[in-house]
């Protein structure tokens, strides 16, 4: 059980998260401005910059581990404390929390098995771990499985489109090999991003409206998942592929974040 909860020590096991950015020609400059990915395993660098000169950091947290894949209950609830205060009690699979605002500085974070009677009352399984955040950081810390089925967590820098556009990101967080991401395959302006691997994302600003988004095993062009959402302006859509297809637990979790007009 310690191995399971260790997956949710969001700051203890953060790996490098690369962001492959693709756009249509009209949006390429916008995407370049939004990239900003660190190449270090340190939390501060991994969080990435939002590109805005603001005071404090904005962090979202997502739980993408189906306990069934690890021989536990599907919900896999845990308690997360920050500086000794119980910040996320009973945090369960499919849940997102945030935005959580942090002033720049150091924070002590611990993760324990959920205790409904005394939240965060169990002995921490991971931590306390001290981490540092900087002004302007904006990211989602997401617990998930590797493509070998091991618990891990990744930091995905959150990009936001210019006013009037939507932002779309596909985030590979499933126990599955590389995939091709296909956006609007029937359109002459369709986008195909090959070989997206676990823990990485492809992110692009996009015109509002209905768009088709599909995932296919790398090189196959045969979708294993496809949706046609209506994307609204001033909204970022982050789609996470999670679970294990061979276990019947594969699904896509959607995080939506509104940004300023």
Image (tube, rainbow, N blue to C red):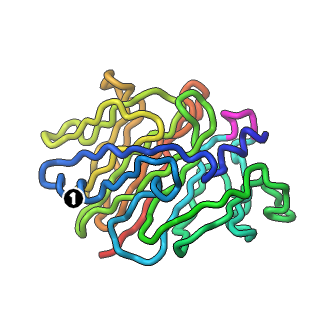
Which quadrant does the N terminus fall into? top right
SS assignment at label 1: helix
| Residue 99: x %, y % from top left | 52, 68
Instruction: Report the magenta stretch's main SS.
Output: helix
**Front residue (pair 133, 24):** 133
The residue that appears at 35% across and 74% down in the rendered structure is 53
Does the magenta portion include 119? no
The residue that appears at 73% across and 58% down in the rendered structure is 128
Residue at the spot of label 1? 30
The residue that appears at 65% across and 44% down in the rendered structure is 7
76 left or right of 121 in image: left
**Front residue (pair 82, 248):** 82
61 left or right of 135 in image: right
Does residue 183 show up?
yes
Q: Within the image, what quadrant is residue 187 found in?
A: top left
Q: Within the image, what quadrant is residue 130 found in?
A: bottom right
The image shows residue 150, relative to residue 57, as above or below, that is above
The residue that appears at 63% across and 66% down in the rendered structure is 107
Label 1, residues with CA under 10 Å away: few <14, some 14-19, many ≥20: some
135 left or right of 142 in image: left
Q: Magenta residues, as a range? A: 67-72
Q: Within the image, what quadrant is residue 72 found in?
A: top right
Does residue 230 show up?
no
């Amino acid at each position: 059980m310690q191995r399971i909860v260790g997956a949710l020590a969001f700051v203890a096991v953060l790996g490098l998260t690369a962001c492959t950015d693709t756009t249509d020609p009209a949006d390429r400059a916008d995407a370049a401005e939004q990239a900003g990915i660190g190449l270090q395993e340190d939390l501060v660098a991994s969080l990435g910059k939002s590109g805005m000169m603001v005071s404090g950091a904005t962090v979202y947290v997502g739980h993408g581990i189906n306990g069934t894949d690890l021989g536990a209950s599907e919900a896999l609830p845990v308690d997360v404390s920050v500086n000794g205060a119980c910040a996320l009690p009973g945090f369960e699979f499919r849940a997102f929390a945030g935005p959580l605002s942090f002033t720049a500085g150091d924070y002590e974070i611990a993760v324990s098995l959920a205790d409904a009677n005394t939240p965060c009352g169990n002995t921490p399984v991971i931590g306390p771990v001290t981490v540092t955040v900087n002004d302007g950081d904006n990211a989602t810390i997401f617990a998930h499985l590797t493509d070998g089925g091991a618990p891990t967590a990744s930091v995905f820098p959150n990009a936001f489109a210019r006013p009037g556009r939507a932002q779309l990101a596909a985030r590979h967080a499933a126990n599955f090999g590389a995939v091709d991401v296909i956006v609007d395959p029937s359109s002459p302006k369709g986008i195909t991003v090959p070989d997206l691997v676990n823990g990485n994302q492809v992110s692009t600003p996009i015109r509002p409206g209905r768009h088709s988004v599909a995932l296919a095993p790398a090189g196959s062009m045969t979708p294993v998942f496809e949706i046609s959402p209506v994307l609204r302006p001033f909204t970022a859509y982050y789609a996470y592929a999670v679970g294990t297809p061979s276990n019947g637990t594969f699904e896509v979790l959607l995080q939506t974040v509104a940004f300023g007009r």
